Image (cartoon, grey):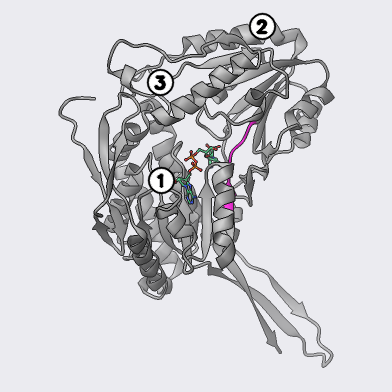
Amino acid sequence: MDADVKVAERKCYINGRFAGSGKQFAKINPVDGTVVAQVHEADRAMVDEAVRAAKAALKGPWGKMPLQARVDLMRKVAEGIEKRFDDFLQAEVADTGKPVELASHLDIPRGAANFRIFADIVRTYGTESYHLDTPDGKGAVNYAMRKPLGVVGVIAPWNLPLLLLTWKLAPAMCCGNTIVAKPSEETPSSATLLAEVMQEAGVPPGVYNLVHGFGPDSAGEFITTHPMVDGITFTGECGTGSAIMKAVAPTIKPISFELGGKNPGIVFADCDFDAAIAGMGNAVFSNTGQVCLAPERLYVERPIFERFVAAMKAKAESLKLGWPQDKSTNIGPLISRQHQEKVMSYYALALKEGAKVVTGGGIPKFGDARDKGAWIQPTLWTGLPESARTVREEIFGPCAHIAPFDREEEAVAMANDTPYGLASTVWTRDLSRAHRVAQAMEVGISWVNCWFLRDLRTPFGGAKLSGIGREGGLHSLNFYSEPSNVCIKL
Ligand code: NAD
Ligand code: 6OD
């Protein structure tokens, strides 16, 4: 980092005002280990104040606002993000170390797009109505109304901070809810800038509240256990999801969970080989592998196995691990030294389990300030049995194991032999096989000849351990609103 870059202060935002706390923690830039922000951690009393402000705001101007005005306000928030594009970009890059090229094409535009798409969809969101015959022949008419859930606790991870936070906030706010949001302790900045945008756009006080902090015995737990929080939407690890389920049980809140994955990629010999290498290279390594949808298990039909492994090795070795502001950088560091230790422990485990290292496997040496960061080499392995922990557990790093297969049924069976069920990607030119295999995948999202191609109206979420419920389009609106039936005797 430049010597003159200031350490930012990231405060909470409660009831329309920025609020400091007596307890702060440092946010470290994973590129070079420097402190980029001092973050004000919300204590239980601050979270309680945020929840009460959110509850009160449901009865204020926000609760009375006509739908069109609410939708217009959400569009203003999208414009506000776009107007401050560079501020968001630099904040996201400083927190995560991800390349500006990636954040400027993915994270920040999607932050704005999430508000626009849900503003559009909520305008035409219909409800059911039924005519009921009654013994007196006069009948009754039923119609359902959609009401907001109330106060929604939004708990987000660090890998795509603005994108994943707004993916929840936007539909929740479009449905008329009020929010207590907690970004990851690793990525406090874009959520704080968003509070400024909300304030400038004229979002009434108490509608978007932001509390910083950690999970257990901190802001995360204070939100999930608060009796006045009406619903929880969470993206993060399966273990955290499990802890949150326990925490919300006494107060019976609806939950929406987007959790981890150990996603398969299946490559058939008839695929467009170059497209498969480009697609799989992107899928495995982009965002330094810290994408819940990234495939960490690749199954490749035997006739092209050796060629595929060699091409993926060349791809991995061509990636530039560089400074985020350098436009030719392909991948940045992991999010933190702690995560680097976790990923390195899997790199060591892979060796113990008998993997052949195709490429990578260690920590790169730069000979500059980056040696104080959280960097890791893109890594590929072959030779592991399907029972190996490296093949079964989510690593969340730029790595994958590649195994050969001989028959379609064998590939499908290996791909589905996992407790996770988030996403899959299949590469083939055979149309029937594309449908057959995509449909056989026990996942929420099955891509064919592509990966991370997103239409924001489609259902998004995981099967098995990978989540509860679906987000996207009407699926999000269904979670963030509650149907209430009115029956009128005629
Ligand atoms: P994490 O579970 O450690 O943390 C996520 C959020 O939960 C953070 O804000 C954290 O502070 C909070 N938290 C932690 N413990 C908590 C508790 N007991 N109560 C309340 N809040 C708590 O996840 P992470 O490390 O930030 O993100 C990486 C994980 O997220 C990976 O497993 C990845 O697969 C998953 N993920 C899933 C999706 C998806 O859409 N399915 C998307 C992105 C990331
Ligand atoms: O694109 C999205 O909407 C989305 N939820 C992406 C999730 C990526 C996980 O890391």
Q: Which residues are magenta?
A: 256-262
Element type at marker 3?
loop
Q: Quadrant of the N terminus?
A: top left
Mark 1 or 3, nearer chain start: 1
Element type at marker 2?
helix
Picture layout, residue 274 above or below residue 33? above
**Would you name the residue on which mark 3 appears?**
375
The crowding category of the residue bearing disc 3, from other C-alpha atoms within 10 Å (few below 14, some 14 to 19, many at least 20), is: many
Disc 3 Cβ-to-ligand 1 distance below 8 Å: no
Number of callouts:
3
Q: Residue at the spot x=53%, y=67% of the render?
A: 149
Look at the numbered discs 1 and 2 and tell me whether their residues touch, using CB distance below 8 Å. Answer: no
Amino acid found under the numbered disc labelled 2? Arg
The Cα–Cα distance between marks 1 and 3, rounded to whole angstroms, is 29 Å
Residue 291 location (% of width, % of height)? 52, 32
**Would you name the residue on which mark 2 appears?**
307
Amino acid found under the numbered disc labelled 1? Ala
Q: Is residue 115 left or right of residue 302?
A: left
Amino acid found under the numbered disc labelled 3? Trp
Residue 112 disc label: 1
The crowding category of the residue bearing disc 1, from other C-alpha atoms within 10 Å (few below 14, some 14 to 19, many at least 20), is: many
Q: Does residue 87 belong to the magenta stretch?
A: no
Element type at marker 1?
helix
Q: Residue at the spot x=46%, y=55% of the render?
A: 221
Q: Can residue 348 be spotted in the picture? A: yes
Q: Residue at the spot x=29%, y=36% of the render?
A: 86
The crowding category of the residue bearing disc 2, from other C-alpha atoms within 10 Å (few below 14, some 14 to 19, many at least 20), is: few
Mark 1 or 2, nearer chain start: 1
The Cα–Cα distance between marks 1 and 2, rounded to whole angstroms, is 41 Å
User: Which numbered mark, 2 or 3, is in the foreground of this view?
Assistant: 3
Q: Is residue 401 left or right of residue 404?
A: left
User: Which numbered mark, 1 or 3, is in the foreground of this view?
Assistant: 3
